Amino acid sequence: MTSSGDMFETREGERRLDQDPATMPPDGGIVFIGRLTSPWTTRDTCPKNMRAARAAGQPAVLTVDEPYRAGLQGLDRASHIIILSWLHHAPRTLIVQKPRHAADAKGVFGLRSPARPNPVGLHVARLVGLDVGTGRIYIDAIDVLDGTPVIDIKPYFASTDAIAEATVEGREER
């Protein structure tokens, strides 16, 4: 996999890693279990978050590869699912970022930006339909580019996943 870190301009206050994580030996054996079919084909048109994706009103489809389709059994009992994606176009060397909308630079672990050492995306989507035979999961929306690989799917449990009192001090919506 090639690094896309060089395709992105560094803004004032930002800092890059000395080595691109994409060139380092892997610590684990992550596999892609499927791909997302999304209406978004460019970064400029892709929504920045799931709220914006839902507002756009464009559904999406996650297709799970054949060897993993048996793992979909029972997923239809969930109204919403958590999708972990691999944001393969994101730079992996940026460790301090200065988002356009922010006053100050922040470390990547204090941001929801796709640019990070391991570009894992987290998406909570409403499950609209499921066809285990074809591996297709129909969802209400997604905030990734067409063809984005998926590394995992989990049912969303409001009783344990939602934390009503959670806050981020000085939060800047993206």
Image (cartoon, helix red, strand yellow):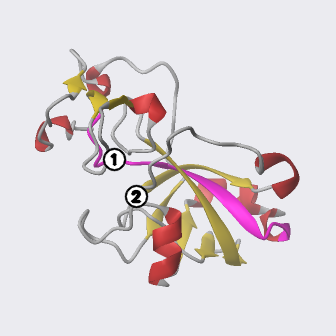
**What is the three-letter code of the residue carrying label 2?**
Thr
Taking the spot 32% from the left edge, 44% from the top edge, the residue there is 102
Nearer-N-terminus badge (2/1): 1
**Classed neighbour count for the residue bearing mark 2: other residues with Cα under 10 Å, few (<14), some (14–19), many (≥20):** many
Left or right: 125 as drawn, with respect to 164: left
2 and 1 marks in contact (CB < 8 Å): yes
Mark 1 residue crowding within 10 angstroms, few (<14) / some (14–19) / many (20+):
many
Q: Secondary structure at mark 1?
A: loop
Placement of 97 over or under 113, stated as above or below: above
Left or right, residue 97 beside residue 32: left
Q: Can you say whether 116 is above or below 127 in the image?
A: above
Is residue 146 something one can see in this rendering?
Answer: yes
Work out which quarter of the rendered image holds the C terminus and state it. bottom left
Residue drawn at point x = 46 percent, y = 61 percent: 49
Magenta-highlighted residues: 77-92
Left or right: residue 32 versus residue 39 is right
Q: Residue at x 29, y 40 (%)?
A: 103
Name the spot of residue 95 as percent of width and height, x first: 31, 26
Tell whether position 90 is magenta.
yes
- Residue type at mark 1 is His
The residue nearer to you, when weighing 42 against 3, is 42
Instruction: Name the side, left or right, on which 34 lies relative to 131.
Output: left
Residue highlighted by disc 1 = 88
**Residue at which label 2 appears:** 148
In x, y percent, where is residue 56?
A: 44, 81
